[in-house]
Image (tube, rainbow, N blue to C red):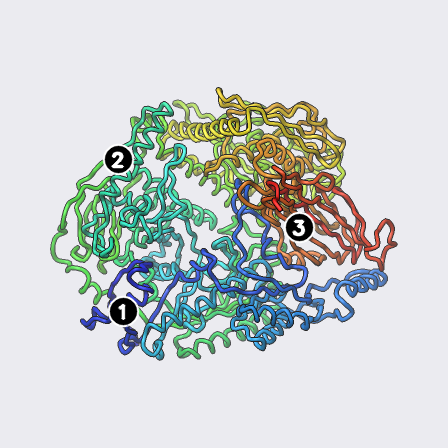
Amino acid sequence: GETIVKPIVKKLLSEDPANYKDAPTEGIRRIIESEEQKPIPTSHDIDINQIETIRMGTTVATNALLERKGEPNVLVITKGFRDLLRIGNQSRPKIFDLEICRPEAIYDSVIEVEERVFPKYEDGNEEEMKAYHHKLKDVYGDDIGTEKSSTGQDVWIEPLKTKNLKDQLEKIHAKGVKSIAVVLLHSYMFPKHELAIEEMAKDIGFTNISLSHKIMPMIRAVPRGLTTCVDAYLTPILRDYVNSFCSGFKRSLEGVNVSFMQSDGGLTPADNFMGSRAILSGPAGGVVGYSSTAYDPKTKVPIISFDMGGTSCDVSRFGGEFEHIHETEIAGTTIQAPQLDIQTVAAGGGSCLTFQHGQLQVGPESAGSHPGPVCYRKGGPLAVTDANLFLGRIQPEYFPHIFGESEKEPLDYEATKKAFEKLAVEINTYYKDQGNSRRMTPEEIAYGFIEVANEAMCRPIRSMTISKGLDARNHELSCFGGAGAQHACAIAQNLKMKKVKIHRYSGILSAYGLGLANVVQETQESCQKPFNKENLMTFNERIDVLSKKVTKQLMDIGFTENRIELKAFLNLRYDGTDYTIMSSESEKGKGDFVAQFEERYNREYGFIIPDRTIIVDDIRVRGIGKTNTNVNHEAESQVQVSDTAGEVKAINTKKVYFDHSWFDTPIYRLNELPLNSTFQGPAMIIHDTATIIVQPKCKVHITATGNVEIDMPEIQQISKETSHHLAKEVDTVKLSIFAHRFMSIAEQMGRTLQRTSISTNIKERLDFSCAIFGPQGHLIANAPHLPVHLGSMSEAVSFQIKHLGDDWKEGEVLMANHPVAGGTHLPDITVITPVYDEVSPGVRKPVFYVASRGHHADIGGIKPGSMPPFSKKLSEEGAAIISCKIVKDQRFDEEAVRTALEGTRCFRDNLADLKAQVASNKQGIQLINELIKEYSLSVVQAYMQYVQDNANFAVREMLCEVAQKHGPVLHAEDFMDDGSKIKLKISIDENKQTAVFDFTGTSGQVDSNTNAPRAVAVSAILYCLRCLISYDLPLNDGCLQPINIIIPDKSILNPEKDRAVVGGNVLTSQRVTDVILKAFKAVAASQGCMNNFLFGNKNFGYYETICGGSGAGPNRHGESGVHTHMTNTRITDVEILEQRYPVTLLEFNLRQHSGGEGKHRGGDGIVRRFLFHDNLSVGILSERRVYAPYGLYGGKPGKKGRNLYYPNPHLSKQENVDDEGKMEVGGRYSLDTRRGDVIAICSPGGGGFGELKK
């Protein structure tokens, strides 16, 4: 039958080592103690006679991953891919950090195993195929053969070699390592080799064996491999925790149903709790809680949840079904497993409050629960909780008295007050030094921090809704978490949401949700087949097999068949794309998975592709064991809430700070408020687990079940008086908020572009940038996309403003890519739209501009991909567009685009991506207009300037520091591989706090394609200036205001308009960056290249940029196998690459010892070797093959890069090859490969920093 739950609430600090070892055990002890009215000593095991079920969510796995305190383990991986998981997708986490820091590996050692599986390609004449098969035997041995994979695909198999593997595993095991992660390429469809290793490892004595095909049988080796390593790293820790927890009870909880919440929102028995499924165990309970209590299936209004705890804020959405994703990044590690779509921002009650260079900063550092904020009486720093306390939003007398040595003292208001008074002195001194007459009271500062924190927490909500094609305004806000209800009204107001729902147990809703959760078992397998009539029977058969498997798993743990609910999914994608959607059957009928796929694809991406084949990547079945646990609201109401009769009575009145004023605010106890009562804010509602803050003019309704609903008032535009006051002089609070808002607009433009684009370059490699600009074309804010685009986009916008003048009408959108028009190279097309507004009665003018730049796969030219290695003229590189209007009179002008892009080989993709860029700009315009409506044009434009002024000040301050350290004149030079010199002199005027960047002496333009448009050098300067500022600062043109740039005409950095430039953007840009940073003596040279690699034929084209080593700095070694400086694009996963294209990757490893020696070593480059299964046209565009990346302060240079070609000896005459059968092909090369040929790209290492003392 149905279990009736009567909640009993006990709330403890998650960590309090002085008083108890484990919070969950202590909580159960206190509940039993309370119910049985007799003490249970903490030294005694707890009696289990009164315990039937324990359900838990835990952050043990998350914390172990964050703190890198997991189980030592060994990674077993396919030979040639030792460093695959370390390289990852090759991007760096923070584009402006010169000393790149990626999370350390979570495996301790690596064993490479001889085996290989890869798709079979058989398409050629007899002679070619015979030579090709000989080459395969050369590489993989005579015993290479073919088999069918589990998906029915023909694959080549190099059998597993076990002898050396066994010896290595035995040595590792003898050292005490008991956990193993096995990651073999393509094991998702051919698990035989992983299973053999499992048996071997069991025999040796390994106690935890994580196999990648079992952990997550999905294509993409890197995320699957990282997830497997996470499992091997965390599962033993979880087992130890479960055993330790159970040991605190009599008979170790034998006979008690103990289950844990998984990341997907389902419970699992403790014995099945796995590390890879436990990362979101803590917040998942909250999602279950609000979905059960806040969502109304009658109205179907979707809910956005806002779970604010001590260190962070979790955001998610519920629209009738749990929204799962299968890949996310947590603690710098990619996790590929079913999990609720929860986004996290580092802003919680414990987030630290600091003042840095004119801006208020909230987080990302956190005070945690130990030592906690100032008010926790443990000597902690100022935090968000302190601000709420100081402003009266937390009342110590109504907050648990659990602080101090006795654990019985209240929050320390006086300490918090003194801390804010001290900070006020610091901020007002800064204002005085800046000549600003504004002064701030401690209350204004605390309230300012709350406003900044609220804006930071709004960003992930905007991001989540925009990325799914949704509008936050059409949702209701459900708020929970210990600190959430204090911020709920403000968050809803910022997002223009109309209703806030707060459950009476909002402070413990994650725990409450555990009581409402069901047990979930899932199984999944790879498929890799087209969705068509011929395969429907196969899909249904496999769904039936998986359903029986899941049903058995649930019945084995006690569920009867009538309590099991099954749901089947197909993981679908369009052929040729990477983005999949896990789609369930529609209500139309069994087997109709495409309807939901197309509906979601259209909603999330803005279009469908009717003529494109749909591929089934995976088949998944989710089994839900119904636990029959519900909440009897009526019974609960009688206990927890007063009767409906009676008036609303306040228990006290206190002053609370709202919107720059103190308000007399009545305080109510939630359990004393009559059901169905209503009253107006301001108000404070106290409950055992939360404090609810109701802003003035909000209307509160206590529901029939005792929960709180708050109706938000209409947003009022600020008055002219307030507007004038805000615009007149910079306010540090509004400066921080506008920095967030401007950046948020650019980020949402980027998400719209990625969501609505179709090409691999934009949607998957993320080769794009979005930004907003002022009325003169100055950069205001950009999302952290590609540095090479940033400064150059400003030049592009400024050019069009001057070029078109009054001929650029409202609503018109144009595209351009020409170097004279601020372009970098021709594949990068910039789409620009003006934002018009009324500047005076009846007069509308551009007040902002928005722009998006994306790398298009092809725009014509002499080679597929429009990046020919040996182009000499711009016309050889594709369509060159100075200015072309693509939207006029609210219509997209397809013919204008077709004419401008004459010669492109993929017009359909060009068209789709250009429409995506237009949509991205439209999103930016809408958000800017909303900002103007909220604050007024004068305020928005004033803070547009103040944000630039702040950056301007930061650069001036940095220039003076550099001049004092290194002198007022800095010099540097370096050479391109063809001998062209890039020479720079930087002259700093300390009095004026300005600098001249003079490139006089730089070589003239060249008869090749390494010429770089002026905009590229501007981008490099802007990027370097931002990198040299040590704190977080939005990048904008204010950084360039103190800078005068001199670049000689007809030089390699400012060529004539008909010169080829495709290499300038991807190669010369990196050298300019190295020269600038060398002048500043900041870091040693990085690889100085993007290693552009292209191959294809008449049917397809493929393009990638390849990582290398970063230069070492004064504080740390360089990073290995990472993209540096002017690019940060991702690389295609090896399994995707081999499934889509006729190539096999023989090796993708770090190039050992290629980083320069020094006190701090340069990062290593990589080795990437391709075996071609077809005759293909190949191009390489690279640098640092002649001149090595320099070291600094005695550090040695990194190794030069190499490009090697190994022609198939069974097919071609071995001319110009050495004894190893290879030939060096230089930095730029174009050739036609044949089946069995191999190309190896060895990227440069980074330079060392400081002399190595022996």
Distance from Cα at disc 2 to Cα at disc 1: 48 Å
At a point 17% along the width and 44% down the height, the residue shown is: 654
Numbered label attached to residue 42:
1
Label 3 sits on residue: 1153
Q: Quadrant of the N terminus?
A: bottom left
| Spot occupied by residue 403 in the image (x, y as percentages of width and height) | 25, 54
Label 2 sits on residue: 660
Instruction: Return the disc, 2 or 1, that comes first in the chain's sequence.
Output: 1
Query: Of helix, strand and loop, which one carries label 2?
Result: loop
- The type of residue carrying mark 1 is Thr
| Spot occupied by residue 107 in the image (x, y as percentages of width and height) | 55, 61
- The type of residue carrying mark 3 is His
Q: Which marked residue is nearer to the observer: mark 2 or mark 3?
A: 3
The outermost residue toward the left is 646
Asked if one can make out residue 348 in the rendered structure from this viewpoint, the answer is: yes
- The type of residue carrying mark 2 is His
The outermost residue toward the front is 1254
How many C-alpha atoms fall within 10 Å of the one at disc 2: few (<14), some, or many (≥20)? few
